[in-house]
Image (cartoon, rainbow, N blue to C red):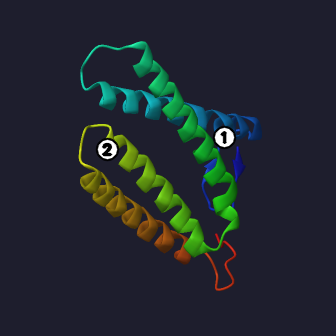
Amino acid sequence: MAHTTSGFPDIFSARAHMAANRVLPVVLGLVYGFWAAANRRDGGPITGWNVLFGFVSALAFMVVLIGVRAVAPRLKRELHAVAWGAFAGVAFGFLYSQTGASVLRSSGNSLMVAGSVTAVLFYRYYTHEDATGHRVS
């Protein structure tokens, strides 16, 4: 068992971490796509169009998640937090809009989610970086 600089033991190998980094977007995307399709059908029968909608939603979620995971860590803490907040807000807003809620309600709720995630992550990044923006442990 190797120890990290954070004081917590790292019980998984580098290979396990690499596999998790590749599998996580796929699993989250499939859960998201299933959730979107279930919201859209509203308890009705599962149709081919509903399954297609779920897979397209899952694919779009996966692609954007991979993009945000690749780009966000390279940004300054403010933009890093905004990128994740925007991702969370859009993802939530899309799911919420599939329930049949109005555009205004979906937009308002997604803005609240985006703002909350941005605020929490900005605080986390601000407290875990030095004045020059380098991460500290």
Quarter of the figure with residue 41: top left
Question: In terms of image quadrants, where is residue 35?
Answer: top left
Secondary-structure class at tag 2: helix
Q: Which residue is mark 1?
A: 21
Q: What's the residue type where badge 1 is placed?
A: Asn
Q: Give me the disc on residue 96.
A: 2
Q: Is residue 45 left or right of residue 78?
A: left
Q: Residue at x 53, y 67 (%)?
A: 81
Residue at x-position 55% and y-position 71%: 125
Please provide percent x and percent y for residue 120: 43, 67
Asked whether residue 128 is in view, the answer is no
Which is more toward the observer, 59 or 6?
59
Q: Position of residue 115 (x, y in %)?
A: 39, 67
Closer to viewer: mark 2 or mark 1:
2
* Residue type, numbered disc 2: Tyr
Residue nearer the viewer, 122 or 37 = 37
- Secondary structure under badge 1? helix
At 64% from the left edge and 69% from the top edge, which residue is drawn? 137
Q: Quadrant of residue 8?
A: bottom right
Would you place residue 4 above or below residue 29 in this image? below
